[in-house]
Image (cartoon, rainbow, N blue to C red):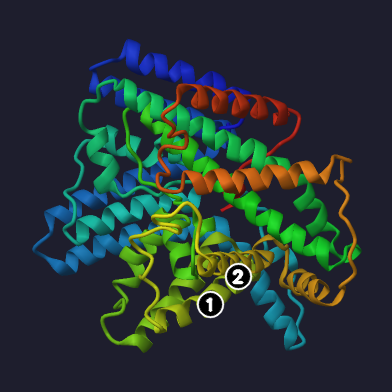
Amino acid sequence: MTFNSIEFFIFLPVVFVLYWFVFQRKLIAQNTLVLVASYFFYGLWDWRFLFLILASTIVDYFVGIELKKHEDDRRRQKFWLWLSILFNVSVLGFFKYYNFFADSFIDMIHLFGYDLSKSWTLNIILPVGISFYTFQTMSYSLDIYYKRLEPCKDFLSFAAFVSFFPQLVAGPIERASNLLPQITKTRTFDPLQFKQGLKLILWGLFKKMVIADGIAPMVDDIFANYNDYSATTLILGATLFSFQVYGDFSGYSDIAIGTSKLFGFELMSNFKFPNFARNVAEYWNRWHISLSTWWRHYLYIPLGGSREGKWKAVRNITIIFLVSGFWHGANWTFIFWGAFHAVVFIPVFLMGRNTIYKNNIVGENTLFPSFIEILQLFWTFSLITFSRIFFRSPSLTASFEFIEKMFTDLRYEPYVHPMGYRMADYFILLALFVLYEYRIRKDERNPFKFKSRVVRFFLYTIIIFAILLFFDSGIDRSFIYFQF
């Protein structure tokens, strides 16, 4: 079941009515409903993988209790912490990376003149969301180990935390210190929170179904047939993919946060208009924030962060980006993508410009950005878009061929939409989308912040009409980050 499916539009109201009108003020009943609804939501993909979520839940629940029990015995605490880490990493590693390492080993042996059978690889199905919920449960154990959190002794609440359906399959990756306390206390219906949730869901559906899915056929066509196109079309394809992946993933996050609001929960922001970043460091403070902060708290700082001098900090930054690339997928393209980001991030860090935009936004007190800011936006967006060629391509060979052709085949050829639609309509749509996001860039939680009811009603009408216009139940448009 996906957020942009007919099934979800039936599922959500049913759960909502049961949650607030049948089980209102009954915490155990509400949490039971959340757990059952979450397992049902996930089980529609493949019910067999529910056992993985259950296993991860059981392991980390008891690990949390043992960590607290032995808080004065660091040696035993480390045993239980490593049990949690090794279990979650092993599950993630087997399902996501076994074939990658098997193929890489076979290729390496082949370099020495030996042939190994490809039967070493297995036909493994990647469980949806495994990278997200394993990181979420690991963070729980780590927070208890570092004494940032008390263990949860209510198994029902903990199971609901691990499997919470709005953010189960693609985040945000929630810290237990934020979400668990909300699960363990009684919730009351808040009409304002409900309205905010509906607005975020509507805006997320627009970004996913109109922006991302609307340009997906062109991206698929250009990347699949890059040998047939000139540089102008390849640049167009890479640029469109930047908008597609942003609309797709930030749209998912908006729907997840909005859906959570309907049930009285507040999740962390996952995107803060990264397309308006003025350097790569600001971009990473605005893109997939829940993962970036996870790396910072659980890998970068334990490695020493920037406390031990700049060169060790450079080492740690490099590790973070390489691991982040590998987290995204079992392919050398993602590792190269991570390495590229390390290369462009490190100069920003060495010049001390990695935090200068932490507390302000582009065009802070003006209607339009300055000329310098426009150049910064263009340069940063260009770097990010270039890196996504590796992210989108099926192999490193295809990535480099795409890039080589982009810099050598300098013919101008107008691109024709694979289904014959007018390209001008899509350019206008994206231009309006960028201008609108610039207008609302100060508050990612309120995409329709206008005083005039007439303006808001007009926007709601246009957006709902656009969603219905672009909706096609016959096309499978799963969210891109489901594969991670």
- Which is more toward the observer, 285 or 102? 285
- Which is more toward the observer, 440 or 231? 440
Which percent across, then down, holds residue 190?
Answer: 29, 22
Looking at the picture, which amino acid does disc 2 mark?
Leu
Query: In what element is the residue under mark 1?
Result: helix
Going from N to C along the chain, the mark reached first, 1 or 2, is 1
State how many labels appear.
2
Left or right: where 66 falls relative to 306:
left
Q: Is residue 442 above or below residue 115?
A: above
Q: Residues within 10 Å of mark 1 (few under 14, many from 20)?
A: some
Which percent across, then down, holds residue 94?
Answer: 53, 59
Left or right: where 409 falls relative to 77:
right
Q: Residue at position x 44%, y 72% from top? A: 320
Q: Is residue 19 above or below residue 382?
A: above
- Which is more toward the observer, 299 or 260? 260
Q: Are marks 1 and 2 in contact (CB under 8 Å)?
A: yes
Residue highlighted by disc 1: 344
Residue highlighted by disc 2: 383
Q: Is residue 208 above or below residue 87?
A: above
Q: Is residue 121 above or below residue 314?
A: above
